[in-house]
């Protein structure tokens, strides 16, 4: 596994549409492994292949201790909508509000070539939609309103808040969290 360099806004690869993966081979497996290491090293929730210079329809997301490795992902259903304040590894120093589906059903293949369905809601739906947008050359700032500049300390605070929301969501699903206190 290797930490990959993240491409930044202005790099033309980020505006291109990715090609479907035709065969899951050793290079695709290596790409998945490198993407996983990249998000872990950078303390991110997800990365799409074009963000690391590969025009392949591949996304890796890690959320609530669950790793999603998606090859040729596509949204097959969505409903509802909510506003999310988003940031991106490829657009450092900025965040903005984006309307995303509250629920999204995504079909993808795993590293073994098996098709599976992800039923995502709320924050996970937003993450998935954000990453899948990258596969079509769309950055969050192309859709965002209320774009703001953020510094390193604000970015660290966003990451802490994100981790807290994820932990609270996890506890709530386990039935041990109720509005800021454990049951």
Image: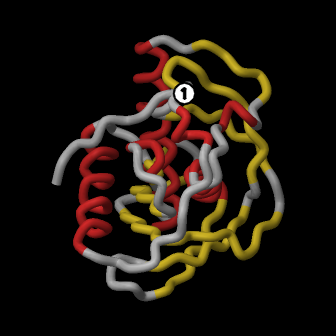
Q: Nearer the viewer, residue 180 or 102?
A: 102
Task: Indicate the secondary structure of the residue bearing disc 1.
Answer: loop
- Height in image: 117 above or below 132? below
Residue 162 vertical position relative to residue 92 in the rendered view, above or below: below
174 to the left or right of 27: right
Looking at the image, is 46 positioned above or below residue 115? above
Q: Quadrant of the N terminus?
A: bottom left
Q: Nearer the viewer, residue 182 or 49?
A: 49
Q: Position of residue 143 (x, y in %)?
A: 76, 37
Q: Name, please, the residue furthest toward the left.
A: 1
Q: Residue at x 28, y 76 (%)?
A: 25
Task: Evaluate whether residue 133 shows in this view.
Answer: no
| Residue 5 appearing in the image | yes
| In the image, farthest residue toward the right | 80
Judging from the image, the colouring scheme is secondary structure
Residue at x 38%, y 35% (from the top left corner): 6
Residue under numbered circle 1:
9
**Residue 33 left/right relative to 127:** left
Above or below for 4 versus 112:
above
Q: Residue at x 59, y 77 (%)?
A: 107
Few, some or many residues within 10 Å of mark 1 (<14, 14–19, 20+): some
Count of numbered circles on the image: 1
Q: Position of residue 51 (x, y in %)?
A: 45, 42
Q: Residue at x 73, y 32 (%)?
A: 97
Q: Position of residue 113 (x, y in %)?
A: 39, 85
Q: Residue 136 appears at what percent x and percent y?
A: 64, 53
The front one of 12 and 171 is 12
Question: Relative to residue 19, is residue 74 drawn left or right?
Answer: right
Image quarter of residue 39 = top left
């Amino acid at each position: 596994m290797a930490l990959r360099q993240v491409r930044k806004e202005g790099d033309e690869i980020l505006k291109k549409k990715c090609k479907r993966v035709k065969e899951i081979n050793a290079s695709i497996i290596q790409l998945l492994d490198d993407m996983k290491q990249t998000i872990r090293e950078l303390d991110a929730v997800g990365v799409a292949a074009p963000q690391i210079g590969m025009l392949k329809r591949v996304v890796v997301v890690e959320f609530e201790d669950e790793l999603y490795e998606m090859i040729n992902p596509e949204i097959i259903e969505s409903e509802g909508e909510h506003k999310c304040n988003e940031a991106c590894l490829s657009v450092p120093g900025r965040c903005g509000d984006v309307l995303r589906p509250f629920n999204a059903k995504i079909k993808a293949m795993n590293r073994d070539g098996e098709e599976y369905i992800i039923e995502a809601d709320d924050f996970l739906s937003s993450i998935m939609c954000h990453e899948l947008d990258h596969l079509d050359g769309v950055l969050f700032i192309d859709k965002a309103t209320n774009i703001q500049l953020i510094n390193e300390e604000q970015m660290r605070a966003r990451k802490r808040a994100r981790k807290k929301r994820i932990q609270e969501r996890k506890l709530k699903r386990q039935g041990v969290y109720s509005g800021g206190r454990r049951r």
